[in-house]
Image (spheres, grey):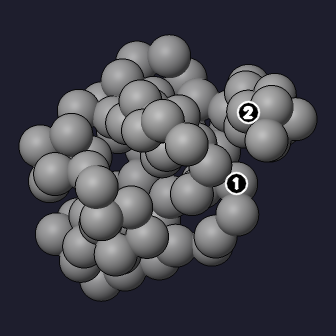
Amino acid sequence: MPRLPPRDALLRIAFRHALTAADAEAGVAQVAALAPALSAGEIHAAIADCLARRLIDDPIRLTGLHCHWRLTLTPAGVAAARTLAAQD
């Protein structure tokens, strides 16, 4: 199977896994564990690309005085991930 573009890999991960972490570094580490072929730079670029395309919500969440990281798809991201899943 050919290597997925980083954006597609991130969408598939967000569609299949509920990722939450204490901070962005830990969140990126969780993505890297699920997609070891991607470098940290590719993961960061994929997150930025998905944010710009409004496929994911901003992963940094502020709740009271605490900050945490969560990878969630927008409705457009769910649609894009479903299209990718249909190609499997």
Q: Quadrant location of the C terminus?
A: top right
Q: Say what amino acid the circle numbered 1 marks.
A: Phe
Which residue matches tag 2? Answer: 84
Q: Quadrant of residue 46?
A: top left
Query: x and y percent of residue 66 in the render?
Result: 30, 80
Mark pair 2, 1: CA separation = 10 Å
Name the residue at the front extreme: 1
Residue 73 in the figure: left or right of residue 26: right
**In the image shown, does 57 or 34 lie closer to the viewer?**
34
Quick one: which residue is furthest to the left in this view? 41
The residue under the point 39% across, 61% down is 35
Percent position (x, y) of residue 26? 24, 77
Whether residue 21 is visible to the viewer of this picture, yes or no, is: yes
Residue at x-position 42% and y-position 38%:
3
Q: Earlier in the sequence, mark 2 or mark 1?
A: 1
Q: Secondary structure at mark 2?
A: helix
Residue 44 horizontal/vertical position (percent): 21, 43
Q: Nearer the viewer, residue 72 or 3?
A: 3
Quarter of the image with the N terminus is top right
Residue density around tag 2, few if under 14, some if 14–19, many if 20 or more, within 10 Å: some
Residue that badge 1 annotates: 15
Q: Mark yes or no: residue 63 visible.
A: no
Disc 2, disc 1: CB below 8 Å? Answer: yes
Q: Is residue 22 left or right of residue 35?
A: left
Left or right: 70 as drawn, with respect to 11: left
Foreground mark, 2 or 1, reads 2
Residue type, label 2: Leu
Does residue 3 sit above or below 5 in this rendering? below
**Mark identifier at residue 72:** none
Q: Farthest residue toward the right?
A: 86
